[in-house]
Amino acid sequence: MKKLLLVLISIVLLSCASSKSVNNSKKMIKGIWSLNSITHNNTGLFNIKLLNDSSKQCFENSVWQFIPNNNSGIYSISKEGCSTGDRNFIFTIEDIDASTGYQSFLLKPTNEKKKSATNEGFRIQLLQLSEISMQWQQTVSVDGSPFKITMNFTKNQ
């Protein structure tokens, strides 16, 4: 009985711990980033609204700060003609497939107190993350077909 209890406690503790790759990703993502470009895989003109917030054009050159010790951050839109200002969010990084290194990123917009008005989050694939660059990809459906939006970041500090 004691062995069974010890095994169950070990399983619970291990399931709550972050993997080594998630911890490494959190270390690398810490800091200030610029969202340099946003592309998509389809030809033609599309009105792309990201994170239910602003257009693709408004998000380009936005500045993002990631604070991994409390899984929070802020992004700032400053482009003229856009709804400018700081937006708060919380995020998590999850291993989806440890053998391939595939990770996903869940981003949830919040207020300054880290509370979400809608409890809505956005699942984004973390395609690439290094000390100097990061690439996200979000797949949505357009007319029943996959539409992939790719966001390219460079690290400022």
Image (cartoon, rainbow, N blue to C red):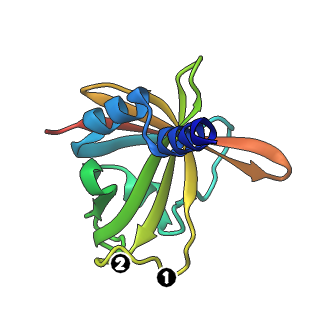
Q: Amino acid at mark 2?
A: Asn
Whichever of labels 2 and 1 marks the residue nearer the N terminus, that label is: 2
Q: Quadrant of residue 27?
A: top left
Q: Camera-side residue: 7 or 137?
A: 7
Does dot 1 land on a helix, a strand or a loop? loop
At x 57% / y 69%, what residue is drawn? 120
Residue hosting label 2:
111
The residue tagged 1 is 117
Residue 60's place in the image compared with 40, above or below, is below
Residue 65 visible to the viewer:
no
Q: Identity of the amino acid at label 1?
A: Ala
Q: Which residue lies at the image location 32% right of the left edge and 59% below the top edge?
A: 72
46 with respect to 52 (left or right): right
Please give the name of the residue rendered at 25% of the width and 43% of the height, measured from the top-left corner.
33
Q: Is residue 144 left or right of residue 63?
A: right
Percent position (x, y) of residue 28? 27, 33
* Residue 35 % position (x, y): 34, 45
Give me the disc on residue 126: none
The quadrant of the rendering that contains the C terminus is top left
**Tag 2 secondary structure:** loop
Residue that protrudes farthest toward the front in the picture: 1
| Extreme residue in the bottom direction | 117
Q: x%, y% of residue 34?
A: 27, 44
Q: Which residue is nearer to you in this view: 122 or 95?
A: 95
Q: Nearer the viewer, residue 8 or 125?
A: 8
Rendered-image quadrant of the N terminus: top right
Q: Tell me the distance, in whole angstroms, between the alpha carbons under discs 2 and 1.
A: 8 Å
Q: Residue furthest right?
A: 144
2 and 1 marks in contact (CB < 8 Å): yes
| Residue found at x 34% / y 55% | 71
Residue 35 seen in this snapshot: yes
Crowding at label 2, few (<14), some or many (≥20) Cα neighbours within 10 Å?
few
